[in-house]
Amino acid sequence: MKFFVDTADTAQIAELNDLGMVDGVTTNPSLILKSGRDILEVTQEIAAMVEGPVSAEVVALEADAMIAEGRKLAAIAPNIAVKVPLTWDGLRACKVLSGEGNMVNVTLCFSANQALLAAKAGATFISPFIGRLDDINLDGMQIISDIRQIYDNYGYETQILAASIRTVNHAHQSAMIGADVMTAPPAVIKAMASHPLTDKGLAAFMADWEKTGQKIL
């Protein structure tokens, strides 16, 4: 499973990238706002830091304007994936941009039917939002399972990018189902290393080591 980090904070991206935990980056208007940076400037900086895809989102709502914005974003670096919303205009933009050889990430997906349309429009990635489905008492993981089955049934190459991941359980379940990619905030990725029994075992080892009176260095 590929790990994309969901942030526009370059310091956090660099930290995880140094550990080999970054296969790509996703951004959106909310993350750009949080960073306080210019979208073109910060996107260019992130794209230079990582080898994998960097999703940069259009903000237009009409297809022709999405296409124009997408072309400008794609020109920033060869590893830019243009992010478009899963609307009819977004699908039109996806078809054009992907046809021009650009990576396209279709975002705000909340149903398997939407994901099927995105695959047929040539999406590189489909981003189903797990956490937001959970928020309205729907099973966010079910959509990952449904999309996986549909794509496997027909051999679609669109990669399932599990998004709106808020917990380590979301990450685990997405991997078990077979999502190609997950995108998560840095805090969730770091939390995957934590386990109370690891902490307990380490404390016991250190207590015993202290009793030996020895040093390694």
Image (cartoon, rainbow, N blue to C red):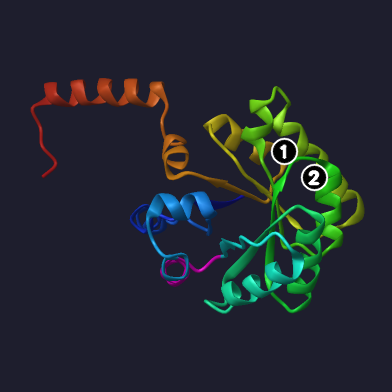
149 relative position to 62: left or right: right
Pointer 1 residue: 177
- The one of 57 and 183 positioned closer to us in this rendering: 57
Instruction: Please provide percent x and percent y for residue 130.
Output: 66, 36
Mark 2 secondary-structure assignment = helix
- The one of 171 and 26 positioned closer to us in this rendering: 26
Q: Earlier in the sequence, mark 2 or mark 1?
A: 2
Question: Marks 2 and 1, Cα distance to the nearest angstrom?
Answer: 8 Å
In the image, residue 213 lies in the stretch drawn in magenta? no
- The one of 104 and 193 positioned closer to us in this rendering: 104
Against 3, residue 193 (above or below) is above
Q: Which residues are magenta?
A: 43-52
> Who's the residue at 62% across and 66% down the image?
81
> Who's the residue at 80% across and 45% down the image?
148
In contact (CB < 8 Å): disc 2 and disc 1: yes
> Who's the residue at 61% across and 60% down the image?
59
> Who's the residue at 87% across and 60% down the image?
120
